[in-house]
Image (cartoon, coloured by chain):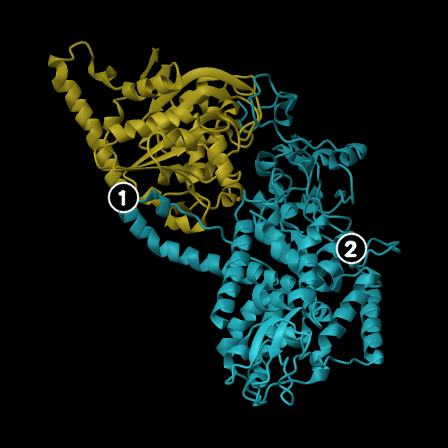
Amino acid sequence: MIRFRQSVQLLFLALFLLLLTAASISGISMASLDLFLLMDPSLVLLSAISGRIVLLAFIPALLVLISGPLIGRVFCGYICPMGTTLDGTDALFGPPKKKFFSSARLTGLKYLVLIFLTASALVGVSYIFFAAPLSLITRAYGLVIFPLVSFISREVLDLARPLGDWMDLGAITFAQIRTIRFATQFFILLFFATVIGMAIFSPRFWCRYLCPSGALLALVSKSPIVRRRVSDQCTQCGKCARKCPMAAIDPAAPETTRHSECIVCRTCEAVCPEEAISFGIRKRTGMLPTGGVSLERRQLVSAGLIGAGTAVISLTGLTSLYGKQGEGQVRTPGLVRPPGALPEMAFLSRCVRCGECMVACPTNTLQPIWLKAGLPAVFSPALTPRRGFCDPSCHECGAVCPTDAIRPMSPLDRIWAKTGTARIYRRKCLAWEFQKSCMVCDEVCPYDAIEFLKEEGSKVPVPHVLEHKCAGCGYCEHFCPVQHQAAIVVTPMDALRIEKGSYEVEAKQKGFQLQLKPKGRGTAQPEASSDANQGEAPGFDPP
Amino acid sequence: MKRKFSRRDFIKLQAKYGLFMAAVTSGLYLPKIGIASAVPDIGVAVGKPEAATRAAVDLIGGIQSVVKAGHRVLIKPNMSFARSPEQASNTHPDVVKTIAAMCKEAGASKISILDHTLSSAKVAVQMSGIGPACEAIEKNMVHPINDANLYTPVRIDNAKSLTKTDVVKEALKADVLIAVPVAKSHSATGVSLSMKGMMGLIYDRGIMHRLDLHETIVDLAGLLKADLTVIDATRVLSTGGPGGPGKVIPKDTVIASRDMVAADAYAVASFEWYGKRFKPDRVRHIRLAHERGLGRADLDNLSIKTVKL
């Protein structure tokens, strides 16, 4: 039976990784790439509370919750990629040196975590990313493991290149593996390593004592229909209790089961020397007490107060945008959100920091931030144009976002989803400051938002940003040949952050004209382009 | 590096003398063609892209004079932009395809068609039409080269300012380099033709902007000196280059030369740029290349042969 469970676990882990990999391949944007995230009960419930939303996409989590009263915490034992990963890493650690931790008080900790998160979600602040298992594990695989794998494959490919060359396989000689890099990787790793490292105390420490989704499932799995059954053959040897990874069996009374802790792994069934244990539909007779956890009311109230308090303190932070922004402009400078990101407060309340958008981003411009915009914004995505541009024909981030913190939109509307406005730092600009005939920003701008004009006292034409045509895509900043800080930089100014409605309508209302340079047919008629203005022939020497 | 190029120069020299000798000795069966006019410096053909490409190259001695059996060939088109062929920001796919086909007919052992794209690599290869067109000749010839691992650092001897750069490894391995640029305007360098196009074979173009674009283009042409240049002027992007959109003038012309500078100079002189006419020496990198002896921009002293198809 254990083999069977492990196979199922590996199958689901493989599916999880497959969907994550599919998200990373541009062009694949199925709606179901975020399936596992949407199965996470606490992630979905808490997002619904903090973001004040109910989405049809939340159905998978609902199904998982419904499975609790029927079959117990099967999700934890068979499906959850965090559980499977921990089973694997726990095996590497081996059994804990000391006696298993099995404090009943500690078992209650996960409920306190859940209450903490629920209270802060009620205030409207999402701290899900600290503890929702699918947020943690997707982020770890997507933003730490995935770049690692791509790095190694790239090195292997480089070794194989001469071979490909020798065998005349152009496909290998010129194969290019996307190099993916992420900021804050060690902080992400720190979260993950902490969860894994707890194996020194007990197997599945996370699932037993900390996981808020485990807590939610435990609440609905107190007395499942399909459950562990112990027959009269039981000699109370206690072997099952010692082997149970979840400490769901009381060593003093091995015939009883804490069903809310049981993940139906069926280890007890396998190790029982008397074959007294089976899993099946509960019988009327032999119903034994389900020694649950009792938490003091005081603890519950404290957890709630601490959660709400933390949330309120977050809202009073300098960078918080709650309510009136107060005096001055304290928005985080240079924080450019992906196209279609909701207004900042709503965005942060919905974003679960799973990192799917960053995995999906084909140019790697989406990067997690650390404390730049305060604790509530940790690991949230930001455009990093020096790393990559944001292609106006791409909206993979919105397609994979599980909670629509980045709104999905039509390709036509996408062009209007302005993320910011480019500004020129003339003192760094090759044309303005150094009188060199550089026009890279104009060359690469997909919106034709750069105009080169001949200024008085300037030998060469110099760039200007036509702000009403600029969408903040960052092509200019990315390709600007000036080193380090570019001479043209995307700022979050005038980004369109709307909760609903069309970006085109909103942009036009604000006087923006965001149009891509024509792509399809050639323009046979002379363009009223900035380059042709004033009868100049840029780049030619005077006679 | 140096040895590589001197070998290529040697092959070139050999080919030149071979042709010269052939012209001399073939007086028997080619009585009407004089020595001077046997192989013009520049061949120009007017017609449909494919036919004009073949005709222009044939005028200057045919592809066999450049590509020998077993040669490894690197073709450098313009396919940097996610633009359609009509917009003239990229080389016409039929011109590139024809050159590839001709190299294959001449017995090339390996043909690579490479460019370091500005737009997203896959989109540029698709939208330029070059990827799909060349698939028909042979699979796996067209590659965007945007990965730093494909490049290797190289010193450029005799350079004035770009003394070293990372160049695509294939450029060092290839026996023959063929430039197949489109004729287009360029807002910083006047025009973007074969010499400017070599920026598509190096990794860091930014430094060329920071130094001096014209001078570094000539430095680079000293390193990446095409053995054959075929300029696609089937349509000319007369304004708005390099990316466009701009004024596109149909010209149905293909220009071929063994001399990059001569081909570029001819293209400058032959078409209208920003509504005006220019002498080649108004483009600084062409003038500098001529002065440094990389090639000849003195069109008056060159033999030019034109055919209309």
Residue at image x 65%, y 79%? A257
Q: Which chain carries label 1?
A: B
Residue closer to the observer: A266 or B255 = A266
Judging by colour alone, the chain drawn in yellow in this rendered image is B
For the residues tagged 2 and 1, is the chain the same?
A: no
- The residue sitting at 33% across, 27% down in the picture is B99
Query: Residue type at mark 1?
Result: Lys
Chain for disc number 2: A
Image location of residue A375, percent across then percent down: 74, 64
Viewer-nearest of labels 2 and 1?
Answer: 2
Residue A243 vertical placement versus B262 (above, below): below
Does any portion of residue A236 appear in the rendered image?
yes
Q: Where is residue B43 in the image (x, y as percent from the top left)?
A: 33, 19
Q: What kind of element bears circle 1?
A: helix
Colour cyan, chain: A
Give coordinates of residue A376: x percent, y percent: 75, 62
Q: Please tell me which residue is depicted at 51% across the width and 22% down the height of the picture.
A: B86
Q: Name the residue under label 2.
A: A51
Occupied quadrant, residue B68: top left
Q: Is residue B33 above or below residue A206?
A: above
Q: Where is residue A334 in the image (x, y as percent from the top left)?
A: 71, 52
Could you tell me how far apart the alpha carbons at marks 2 and 1 are, in whole angstroms?
A: 64 Å
Q: Which amino acid does label 2 sit on?
A: Gly
A112 on left or right of B66 = right
Neighbor class of circle 2 (other Cα within 10 Å; few <14, some 14-19, many 20+) is: many
Quarter-of-image position of residue A535: top right
Disc number at residue B4? 1
